[in-house]
Image (tube, rainbow, N blue to C red):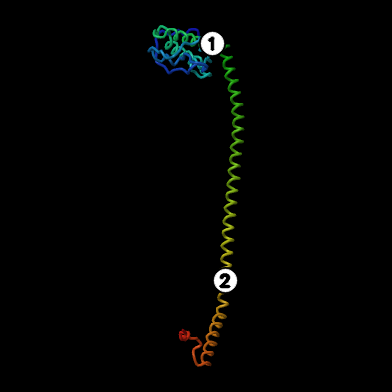
Amino acid sequence: MNPSVPPATTPTPSQPLPETIKQEPSITISSFTTTETTTDIPAIKTEELFNEFYTEVLQIDPNLAFEDIAKQYRKLSMLVHPDKNPNQPERAQVAFEAVNKAYKLLEDEKERKKCLEVVDEAKERVEEMYKRALWSMTCKLFADIERLRVREEERKAEERKRKAEEKADGEEKAKLRKEWDKNYEESREVRVNSWKSFQTTAKTKTAAKGKPTTTLFKPPKPKPETR
């Protein structure tokens, strides 16, 4: 214990402490970082601030050495002392009592040990929660990765199928074109011979008749009109 730590008598600047329990609007140590009158913060039940964990009231690390805790206590008690906050004496009194209660708790070595046991228990629970959360998130990420892998494989398979169909279609068209060209070339000589034969036959018939095979159109003779 360190009972020699004196109460504060003059205010000094310091960082504001965290807010109190969020159940309803309440007084906070941070509201005493200025001595100006504050009218928009409602009244508070004293037990609300007293229910704060000592690390929140004194704004310290749970494992901080007691000498450093005493320094922080002096700083805060000077900040919130009612004599130094004449514009809000009731609020200052509540905060001052909360700071004193937190310090008195840590001043008792047995009580401080109990508080540290609570902190250690909280750390263990948080660690267990972290392990479970890590396991859950790891499983989720692996599942997401697997879904992405399957989706990518399906996309690639669909792409391969499309390209294979396009290739097969192109090969089929090329095959048909090749066959058509081949048949066209093979029938060229037949077509030429047929045309030559047709021309020869036509000339032979014309020569045999001695005149063109074409027939000229002859109009009918006019008939005399009968009365």
Binning the other alpha carbons within 10 Å of mark 2 as few (below 14), some (14 to 19) or many (20 upward) gives: few
In the image, residue 82 lies at what x, y percent?
42, 7
Residue 5 or residue 72, whichever sits in front: 72
* Of residues 7 and 224, the one drawn nearer to the viewer in this rendering: 224
Query: Which residue corresponds to the image point at 53% horizontal and 87% vertical from the top-left?
Result: 202
Instruction: Residue 129: give x, y in percent of width and height.
Output: 60, 26
173 sits left or right of 13 in the view: right
Q: Amino acid at mark 2?
A: Trp
Label 1 Cα neighbours within 10 Å, binned few <14 / some 14-19 / many ≥20: some
Say if 203 sits above or below 168 in the image: below
Q: Which residue is mark 2?
A: 180
* Residue that badge 1 annotates: 105
- Image side of residue 144 versus residue 97, left or right: right
Q: Mark 1 falls on what kind of element?
A: helix
Between discs 2 and 1, the one toward the N terminus: 1
Which of the two marks, 2 or 1, is nearer to us in this view? Answer: 2
Q: Can you see residue 166?
A: yes
CA gap, disc 2 to disc 1?
Answer: 103 Å
Which amino acid type is marked by label 1?
Leu
Point 53% across, 18% down: residue: 62
Q: Is residue 1 visible?
A: no
Could you tell me residue 144's position as x and y percent? 59, 39
Residue 29's quadrant in the figure?
Answer: top left
